[in-house]
Image: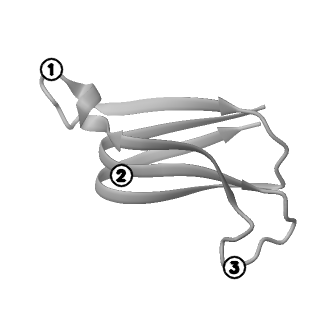
Amino acid sequence: VHTVYVVVNAFLGDITIQGTLEQYPSSDDSDWVDVTTFAGDSTFYNQPNNNDAVDYDFSETFTGKFVWIRAKYTLENGTIREIRYNY
């Protein structure tokens, strides 16, 4: 069982958690699979005043046997404050 906790601020983009079973993954990303994705606009959750100074946090729990876990992201706006991982 794995849990990922993410804190973002005025975030617009995607954060994808990926896993692999390879001990030495290739550099072309073909060994990685998407496990879970947070896609969206965190300012939507800061309503009604849409205060960008407010952080938005979320967590996701998933199961699986992985050798490596990583976070991949695309950032259009805002800040990723932290990503924490527990297994």
Q: Residues within 10 Å of mark 3 (few under 14, many from 20)?
A: few
Residue 46 at x, y percent in the picture: 24, 27
Residue 27: mark in rendering: 3
CB contact under 8 Å: marks 2 and 3? no
- Residue type at mark 3? Ser
Query: In the rendered image, which residue does mark 1 sit on?
Result: 48
Query: Which residue lies most toward the bottom here?
Result: 27
Query: In this orientation, which residue lies closer to the viewer: 67 or 33?
Result: 33
Q: How far is the residue under mark 3 from the one under mark 1?
A: 44 Å
Q: Is residue 15 left or right of residue 36?
A: left
- Residue type at mark 1? Pro
Q: Residue at x 31, y 45 (%)?
A: 11
Residue 17 at x, y percent in the picture: 60, 49
- Residue type at mark 2? Gly
Which callout, 1 or 2, points at the residue further toward the start of the chain?
Answer: 2
Which callout, 3 or 1, points at the residue further toward the start of the chain?
Answer: 3
Q: How far is the residue under mark 1 from the one under mark 2?
A: 21 Å
Residue 53 at x, y percent in the picture: 22, 36
Query: In this orientation, which residue lies closer to the viewer: 9 or 31?
Result: 31
Query: In the rendered image, which residue does mark 2 sit on?
Result: 13
Q: In the rendered image of this protein, does residue 17 appear above or below residue 54?
A: below
Q: Is residue 17 left or right of residue 69?
A: left
Quarter of the image containing the N terminus?
top right
